[in-house]
Image (cartoon, grey):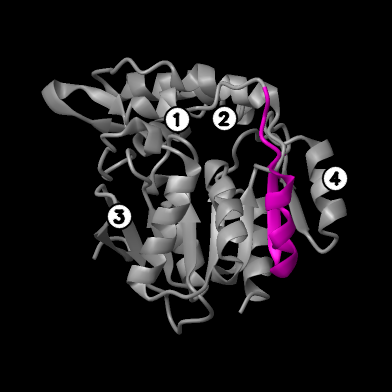
Amino acid sequence: MTQGYSDHFFSTVDGPRLHYRDYAPVGAARGVPVLCLHGLTRNVRDFEDLAPRLAMLGRRVIVVSQRGRGRSDADPRAERYQPLTYAVDMIGLLDALGIERAVFVGTSMGGLMTMLIAAQQPQRIAAAIINDIGPEIAEAGLNRIKANVSVRQPVTRWDDAAARSREANLAAFPKRSEDSEFWLDFAHKTWVEAKEGQIELAYDAPIVSQIDSSDVAPDLWPFWQPFQAFPTLLIRGGISDLLTPETVAEMKRRKPDLDYVEVPDVGHAPFMTEPEAWTAIEAFMQRVA
């Protein structure tokens, strides 16, 4: 046990093993567990600051690296790097852990996974926290992500990894421009030491090839309908280029009881430990059984 969590592995139905962290509740356990789902190229470390805070609220917290990320196995079949595959994996993990219902916390792709699970098994979702994603994905943000993930050259020093992290993400965190500690921490969340002294991005390269290049985006609004059945908090980065204010307005129109918070001066995506985000999350979790 380290830092309040234990490391485990789960075998999916089609082979790859997934690494997950299991954070025990601090003090008396309260309410259903929390399942944290990261974005496209991230891993369990994306939640290493948020998960302990959730555990302090008395919640068991499960954080998973999806296949091909972090310490999880790569998938030999690149076509399975899709949110639907990951959603099936997460249902299987919950079954294996004996968790019938959970609070889903989904950042970006993790939010899309939550939408897919809501469409398949809405009874598994006690509540949802959706971080900077919606049923309409802005083209500008999607193009930026495609450009960022296409650059994968390894480095040999952590300072260089931090510089690369800053270059790729400065638009989302402009107030952190000169915060070297922030960018080094960012690098340690997204890069990993590999063989021969190289430091590489912590995701399988074929994941990039599976990003939808279609000019016609799928209609995801039907996947928002199941959210009528459970409490939901939507978090948006105030300068996000992926989730627009117009999409937020339509999400609110279709779900009038939607809780909402905006994190100023942050783009895609907030870490959810920012004061505005955490205050909203803490209040929201207090109302969730």
Q: Is residue 171 visible?
A: no
Q: Is residue 135 visible?
A: yes
Q: Amino acid at mark 2?
A: Arg
Q: Amino acid at mark 4?
A: Ala
Query: Which quadrant is the N terminus positioned in?
Result: bottom left
Measure how far apart labels 1 and 4 are at the Cα level. Answer: 33 Å
Q: Quadrant of residue 142?
A: top right
Q: Please tell me the numbered disc located at residue 183.
A: 1
Q: Please tell me the numbered disc located at residue 12.
A: 3
Q: Amino acid at mark 3?
A: Thr
User: Which of the two discs, 4 and 3, labels the residue nearer the N terminus?
Assistant: 3
Mark 1: few/some/many CA within 10 Å (<14, 14-19, 20+): many
Q: Please tell me the numbered disc located at residue 249.
A: 4
Secondary structure at badge 2 equals helix
> Magenta region: which residues?
216-237
Query: Which quadrant is the C terminus positioned in?
Result: bottom right
Q: Which residue is more in the foreground, 165 or 17?
A: 17
Numbered-mark total? 4
Q: Residue 185, image x and y in percent?
A: 40, 37
Mark 4: few/some/many CA within 10 Å (<14, 14-19, 20+): few
Measure how far apart labels 3 and 2 are at the Cα level. Answer: 38 Å
Measure how far apart labels 4 and 3 are at the Cα level. Answer: 37 Å
Q: Residue at x 63, y 29 (%)?
A: 175
User: Which of the two discs, 3 and 2, labels the residue nearer the N terminus?
Assistant: 3
Q: Quadrant of residue 96?
A: bottom left
